[in-house]
Structure formats: structure tokens, C-alpha cells
Amino acid sequence: MPNTMKYNLHTLKNGLRVLLVPMSENETATVVVMTGTGSRYENEQENGLAHFLEHMFFKGTEKRPSAKAVSEELDGVGALYNAFTAKERTAYYAKVRKEFLDTALDVISDIFLHSKLPAREIAKERGAIIQEIDMYEDMPMRTVDNVFDALIFGKEHPLGRTILGPKENIKKFTRKAFAAYLKRNYTPINTVVCIAGAFDEKKILSKIEKDFGVRPHGNPPDFISFTPEQKGARVAIKEKNTDQTHFILGVPAYPYLHKNEFALAVLSTLLGDGMSSRLFLEVREKRGLAYSVHTWIERYPDTGYFAIQAGVEHAKLEKTIETILMELKKIRRTAVPAEELTKAKSYIKGIMTLALETSDEIAQHAATSIINLGRVRPLQEILEEIERVSADDVRRVAKDIFKTESLNLAIIGPHPKREHFYPLLKI
């Protein structure tokens, strides 16, 4: 990704932001329409509605009256297309050969602006979503984060609830509920249209203005903020007869744009990114406790967390937790050697640069940046910030977040006794 990449941001009269990322050498182009809403913006009765609505957008418009008409048109130009719902954003996208960008933009704009939400399709889609919930329930590796989120945020807070929602909600949603959610959250001021790739900027901008410009301004939706108030280590177990125990061990960390965010990224990489990270070497290579162990960071405007996830033999759960905590103690206590720090920074810079090579990744990254941060952070800026992180910064952040009273352990597996794990949770 060249340093000279241009991000041309235009704001329409109604507040909608259009981000154009010209890549003239590219053979592909990607359209992403992203709105700053998701399961965080639901109340308890609405939980699951944002994700269900995302499915409904593909069920037909006036111009393309059925799901078949939508998919045939995109399949007919060999598009890669899909949508996703997260806790704070929902996006619809299509990637095509550059000569078919007009088609991709027309279809994605049409489903975003003119979905009919037919009642009979809502009834049919309930079944598909319930099957999706059941599919993930059979994959504890994919659902242990739900147990963790409920533990760290609490079930009463929207961040503590699942994106898919409970089945009883899915069975009850009405067309009226979808329409109300849509009006409240899918406002122009809360939406970004991003195009990356090879295209005629003037032509594309005028098409977007014509399609999206007629919508009324609206307000940004409200969310309930979160303040961590943890007084001691916590454990949550979803008892299930699985072949393997899946767990996440995590601590509250930082929101977006926090002064420690880059030091935390380096800390996370040192501990659990890549096959030469400390946890991979210690947990897998040295002790053979897990096939996979990795760390990640979750961030929101007002909060965030750092997490470690692994799947292990039931009888080796305690040993694995002890091994991980030993590594957390070590990184708090002893400065990271210069060579290891340099390797971790190079790893992050390499992975990020590789990730931002294609039009779809660039469009997603840019749209997400605008929604979350209000501006695009160029890759070069991120790489420079990573480079500035010192061994002292890493240790300071490790001391700040790795504390006994901040630990949260979420488990899926045949473990009936929660109290069994509290004595282990000490740093």
C-alpha cells in the first residue's frame, strides 16, 4: 500500500460521508456502505434485530423484487459480496472487476436505501437465523466470546449481549420493529459510503449524491456508555459436554484513541500473535497444552479489553491457565529484550501492510476508521506510532492492566464448579 494513498472525504448536505480512495492501477473496485449501529444500539427486547435486519436487506427492493434478483445481478458480474453486523457497526459490501463498479454500487445502494422488508420473508428468515444460532452453539470456539462479553460487561449492558440475540426475540420481531430501528439508526449522519479501487471520481460522487442525498439528515443514535467497576477476579462457566474446553482469559483495557493503544498492540503481539509469540511457544511448543492460543484487543469509544483464547484438553485447563498467568507476571516484571521488541513491531507492521493491499480491505479499514474515529488513519501514521513504542511502555501497560482484581475467565466445557478456578486467578 503506497504512502501516497489519497482518502478524499466528501460530506453531503444531509451529513452522509462519502470516502473515495482512488487506486488507478487496480483491476478491482469495492463498495462498502457502513452505518455506525449494531447490537449495542438495541434494548433487551430488540436484541438480535440489527443482525436480522442486515439479512432482510438482501430480500428485495422495488427495482429488484426478490433475493434471487439481487444475488443474480451480483453473481452475474462475478462479485464477492456480503454484509456483517458487529456491536457498533453494520456494513454491506461488494468487490468487483473495475468495469462492473456501477453495477455493484447500484445494487448495494438499492438494498441499503430501498429494501422492502416483506413480511413473508421475515417469517421465512426467522428459521434461517435460528439455524445460524444453533450452528454457532455447536462451535464453542466461536461462542466462548459471548460468555466472556456477558462476564466482563454484564448481561444487562448491551455490550454484554450477543449480536445474534436470543431465539425468543427472533421469533417475535415484526416488520414495524424493523422499520422503527431503521429510522432511528440508519441515518445519513451515521453512514459512510466508501469506494476503493479504479473509478471515475466525479461520476461516482454524483451517483452517490443522487441516490443518498435525498435522505433527511437524522441524528446519531444514542448508546449506553460503560464504565468497568470490577472489584475482584470473576469466572463464568457455560457447562457443556464438549470434546475440548474453550476459554478466554481477559482484562479491561482501553477505548479508541487511548494514549496506550499502540503499546497495548505491541504487548498483545509479544504475548500471543504469531508462532514465535511467548504464549504460543510456552503453551503449545514447550508444553503441548493447546493446538491454538492467541491474544486480541477489543475496543469501543468508551471501553475495551485484552483477551487470551485457547482450546485445551479438559484435564489440562488449570495447568494452561497457570502457564498463561505466569507469562503475564513475567512481562509485568521484566523489560522485554530489544531484539524481541523489534521482532514484534516488525510483525505488526508486516501483517498490517499485507492486510491493506487489496481494495476490499482498504475500503473496510477506511470506512471503519471514519465510523469509529471520525477520520482515516493512514497506514504510515499507524506504523510510525508502533515504531515509537518502547520496552518501558510495554511494561507500564502490562502493570496497568494485568492485575488479580481485573481478571475475567470465561469457560465452555464440562466444568460444574466455578469456585474451583478462583484460587488460580492471581497475578
Image (spheres, rainbow, N blue to C red):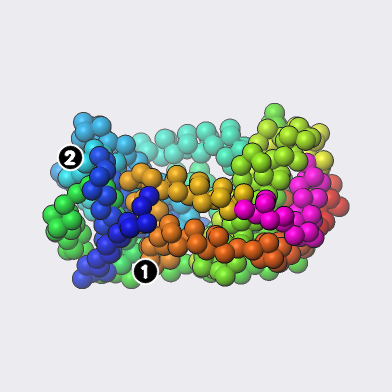
Let me know if residue 326 is in the magenta part.
yes
Most extreme residue toward the top is 243
Left or right: where 360 falls relative to 74: right
Mark 1, Cα crowd under 10 Å, few <14 / some 14-19 / many 20+, is: some
Residue at point 51%, 68% (across, down)? 257
Give the residue at mark 1. Answer: 220
Most extreme residue toward the front is 339
* First in sequence: mark 2 vs mark 1: 2
Give the residue at mark 2. Answer: 99
Instruction: Give x and y (percent) for residue 413.
Output: 71, 37
Left or right: where 41 falls relative to 397: left
Residue at point 35%, 41% (across, down)? 82
Mark number displayed over residue 93: none
In this figure, what is the number of numbered marks? 2
Residue 261 visible, this orientation:
no
Residue at point 27%, 49% (across, down)? 23
Which of the 4 quarters of the picture holds residue 242?
top right
Magenta residues span 320-342
Instruction: Give x and y (percent) for residue 99.
Output: 17, 40
Instruction: Give x and y (percent) for residue 280.
Output: 69, 40
